[in-house]
Image (cartoon, rainbow, N blue to C red):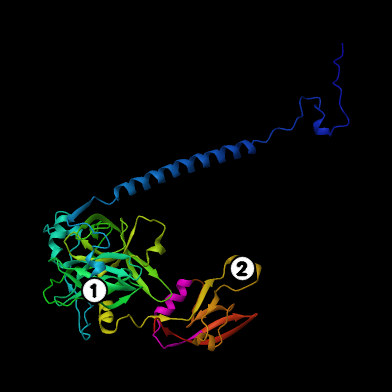
Amino acid sequence: MAKQKPEIDDSLPQWDRGTYQTGSTQPPKAASGIFTVLLVLVIFLGGLVSGLGLINVRLIRQLSQQPGPTIPISQGDYALPADDNPIFNNNMPAPAIPAPRQVEMVMIQSPYYANNVENLALEDGNAVYQANQSSLVEVYALSHGNLTQSAVGVVLTADGYILTNAHIVEAAKRIFVYLPDGRLMPAAVVGSDNMTDMAVLYVETTDLTPATFGTSQTLQVADPIYTVSLAQQARSSMLMTESSMFTASRKFATDYYQLDLLQINHPSESGPLFNSFGHIVGLCISRTAQYFNENDNLGVILGSQDMQHIIDQLVDQGYVSSRPALSFQVEAVSMLFQHYWDLPGGLLVSGVTADSDAAQRGLRNGDIILALDGENLTTRDDLYTVLYSCAVGQEVIAVIFRDGTIKTVTLVVAEHGA
């Protein structure tokens, strides 16, 4: 009997009629989809493992860098109610500020902690405090709203010059200082600088013990350090916190100034920073902390190497001069704006101070600055780099893009705060 041929559906394309008389002709299923799924799965699992590993490393790092214990180092009476507090009711007038003179920090070379072969480091925070007790004061500032701010101050000279934080004493109607021997004395602000959060006070006395400052350049990451502060709502009660160095050098730029700051693994808004040898190597500042908000557990420190020239100007004239400034604001032109509006890369002028030299010389809102003093500008840091290299009063040529054309404007570097 002859073998019967299978029926063929002529409505289907030839390759899909089920047979060519030699077996199934269904097209082979592509394996690329399976490989793609497997590849995505492998990448996902690899990323998951890497992510967990990174989290684990960060957790270990954070745990290893947690600040040490905070210990009381000077027990005293807690603050009295406002009606009984001598700071509120004391009407002693502030002393007259002496004629400007040289106020020099007592600075010595601090050794590197890693090379501490002579075992010069002190045992703990209490030992650091004991070595500096006679040079630390308590600063209290009473505002016009009868609010009190306080911080630990540092004695600069035997005849009454004291270093503290500017944000503590600014806009204060009365300032008092508790000296190490327990005397409460009125103080006057010799000078203050918001940018570095430094202020110099004066009290009328001649028997203080100047603090010993060390070199902050010798600090390295993970070195043990100590900060001292006042207990909340307390009088004559200091607290010492042990921590470690997080960053030994971090550049910080503003519209008017550039600082090389330190960071520690402990938030602190005011007071001195000590190394393990008992030397003051920095001042905890709060003015720039807002720009380092990627980790709220870090403290921002102005290193001791930047203090003397600031103190010189605060004592001599009450403020810090020779900081270059330009009287306009800028923001970078994004890639999206460059593409969508067909704009060149540069810095968009978003504001020009009215009646300023820049306004009078023709700079306008909406101008795009392409170059300044021969240097191309694409970021704000580029502008600051050029600005900090210029002297106050120097003329610089700005190349700008305006209404589809290239122009030049001659600008004069002004003095910030003048």
> Neighbour class for label 2 at 10 Å: few (<14), some, many (≥20)?
few
- Residue 341 spot, x, y in % from top left: 65, 70
Distance of label 1 from label 2 (alpha carbons) = 60 Å
At a point 86% along the width and 26% down the height, the residue shown is: 8
- The image's mark for residue 337 is 2
Q: Secondary structure at mark 1?
A: loop
| Corner quadrant of residue 286 | bottom left
Q: Which residue is mark 1?
A: 91
At a point 65% along the width and 79% down the height, the residue shown is: 404
Toward the top, the furthest residue is: 1
State the extent of the magenta-drawn residues as a range. Answer: 380-397
How many callouts does the rendering have? 2
Toward the right, the furthest residue is: 10
- Residue 291 spot, x, y in % from top left: 41, 64
- Residue 173 spot, x, y in % from top left: 31, 74
* Nearest to the observer: residue 123 or residue 405: 123
At a point 35% along the width and 55% down the height, the residue shown is: 297
Amino acid identity at mark 2 = Phe
